[in-house]
Amino acid sequence: MDPRLPIFPLGTVLFPGLVLPLHIFEERYRELVRHLVGLPTGTPREFGVVAIRSGAEPQPAAGAAATVADRSPVALHDVGCTAELRKVTELPDGRFDIVTVGRRRFQLTEVDEESTPYLTAAVRWLPEPTGQEELADRLAPRVLAVFRQYLGLIRQEPQDGLVRQEPRESPIRQEPQENSEQLPDDPTVLSHLVAATAALTLADRQRLLAVPDTAGRLAAELRLLNREIALLRQVRAVPMPLSELAHPASPN
């Protein structure tokens, strides 16, 4: 029988090892946090983060909690990542600020919308397969070098048309994180960091999350980073509005 997870539909893609701070204000998700906090010591306190393919979570008015009747239908991507609860701060009005860390990838096999106020799902774990380590070791230095080049270019550009911020349409808000100057050498860790921090569309990030192995993810990132570098250089060379060169925003 497939394991089951509570599910958070979000307008973002979480990767293993990446920090995801969230502000919880809907009652159904407050209930989930209380459930996780109440688990016995030693039990993994994790839930699944899955990017929204279409639709959006409701945005209740200030001070109002959304009810089950307020839910809008959402379609989810098939692959997500668990978020492990690391820190919980309960606010006086019952909301929570939490800090989570991405842990392991999974594929949805069955979604349950009825058993609890929040979604739950049966999942299949997606461990990193073996057999491509040598290729990943060869690709990692190339990706690292191109990523450093990309970071150098993007820091020199105004941010009014190139950095495609993911929509914040979820009842749970992800806070921005500073990019670390310390870039990892481990191929798998590097592949997740590049996917999470480069200015990619949600669709690009989702495709990277679904790539089954590190070598394949690094190869895809090499192509994406070269695409982004070419765009950044084109912006410098062509005197036209950045909006005409930016990629279209994700419909998610």
Image (cartoon, grey):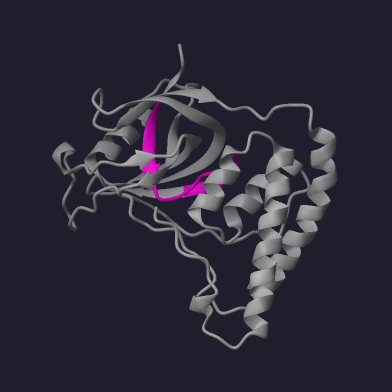
* Residue 168 part of the magenta segment: no
Relative to residue 227, is residue 251 drawn left or right?
Answer: left
Give whichever of 182, 86 is nearer the camera. Answer: 182
Question: In the image, 121: left or right of 14?
Answer: left
Name the foreground residue: 114 vs 245: 245
**Does 123 sit above or below residue 85?**
above
For residue 122, which quarter of the picture?
Answer: top left
Q: Work out which residue is located at the far bottom of the displayed protein and give it.
A: 239
Q: Is residue 6 above or below residue 193?
A: above
Q: Position of residue 217 (x, y in %)?
A: 68, 43
Instruction: State the residue at coordinates (24%, 53%).
Output: 59
Residue 92 placed where, x, y %?
25, 49
Frontmost residue, 159 versus 219: 219
The vertical placement of 177 against 184, above or below, is: below
Q: How many marks?
A: 0
Q: Is residue 120 visible?
A: yes
Q: Position of residue 8 (x, y in %)?
A: 37, 39
Q: On the rendered structure, is 167 left or right of 112?
A: right
Residue 160 in sight here: no
Indicate the position of residue 87 as horizontal and vertical percent values. Answer: 45, 42
Q: Residue at x 31, y 31 (%)?
A: 119
Is 17 inside the magenta-drawn segment?
yes
At horizontal 79% and vertical 27% (from top left) the residue drawn is 131
Quarter occupied by the N terminus? top left
What are the residue bounds of the magenta stretch? 5-20
